[in-house]
Amino acid sequence: MSETRTAVELDQEAAVRRELEDYYRDGEPPWDTGVTPPELVALVEGPGALVPGRALELGCGTGTNAVYLARHGWRVSAVDLVDRAVRQAREKAEAAGADVTVLCGDATRLDEVGVPGPYDLFFDLSCFCGIPPHRRDAYAAGLTERAAPGARLLMFGYGPEAFPDPISGVTADELGARFPGWRLVDVTPGTNPVPTYWFTLRRTTAAVRPGSRQQAE
């Protein structure tokens, strides 16, 4: 069934795309520092590190973190909306000899991207917090459908106070409401000069596939 979107919703989606494209055209996306954040490193290498499995990065930018995960034994798929970022991510992965599948697409329309899952780890470095509100449930549903039992979602997001635009930003309460079947296990404030947070969610029920019955772990 095709989507019906209002003019306001279409304008919001177009504005997000333009802003992202402008950042990469100018070469200064603030979230794409070229350094893997210590929060992801801790999850992959720290005490109680996850066993490598399949990972999906949403809004992968130029591929720094996708390459990092691949180098640490993960089978990685990565998605970004911006062609320029995807090209750079593919080049970075090739130069590093990292086996990463980088796809250009919308993180809220994963059925159109070709990332069937299931995945054990999802990583989101400020992707969700910039998605227009009317697409956020679709983002959550796409991850939930592709989540292995016990899957983790590590998300970095800006708080709403960081933006003059009221549609941007993310809170723990919103994630709790939009991700049924997941448990918010940790919220850690970021170190940025504006309000930011690291959220960790864990899938508490098995992924639901068409024709299947949802089962508890």
Image (tube, helix red, strand yellow):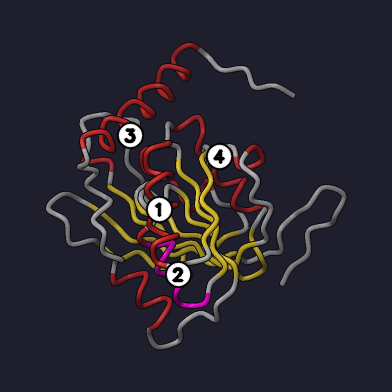
Numbered disc 1: secondary structure: helix
Q: Earlier in the sequence, mark 4 or mark 1?
A: 1
Left or right: 117 in relation to 30: right
Location of the N terminus by quadrant is top right
Assign a secondary structure to mark 2.
helix
> Which x, y percent locates residue 115?
64, 50
The residue carrying mark 3 is: 20
Towards the viewer: 108 or 212 = 108
- Give the total number of marks visible in the rendering: 4
Which is more foreground, mark 1 or mark 2? 1
Of the image marks 2 and 3, the number of the one nearer the N terminus = 3
- The disc placed on residue 69 is 2
Q: Type of residue at label 2?
A: Leu
Res. 202 visible in picture? no
Q: Residues within 10 Å of mark 2 (few under 14, many from 20)?
A: many
Magenta stretch bounds:
65-73
At 55% from the left and 55% from the top, the residue drawn is 101
Q: Which residue is mark 1?
A: 91
Most extreme residue toward the top is 7
Q: Residue at x 39, y 61 (%)?
A: 199
* Residue 191 is one of the magenta-drawn residues: no
| Amino acid type of the residue that numbered disc 3 sits on in the rendered structure | Leu
Q: How many residues crowd mark 1 within 10 Å: few (<14), some (14–19), many (20+)?
A: some
Q: CA distance from mark 3 to mark 4?
A: 21 Å
Q: Which mark lies nearer to you, 2 or 4?
A: 2
| Circles 2, 4 touching at the beta carbon (< 8 Å) | no
Residue appearing at x 66%, y 40% in the figure: 111
The percent position of residue 217, horizontal first and vertical second, equals 71, 72
Q: Which residue is mark 4?
A: 137
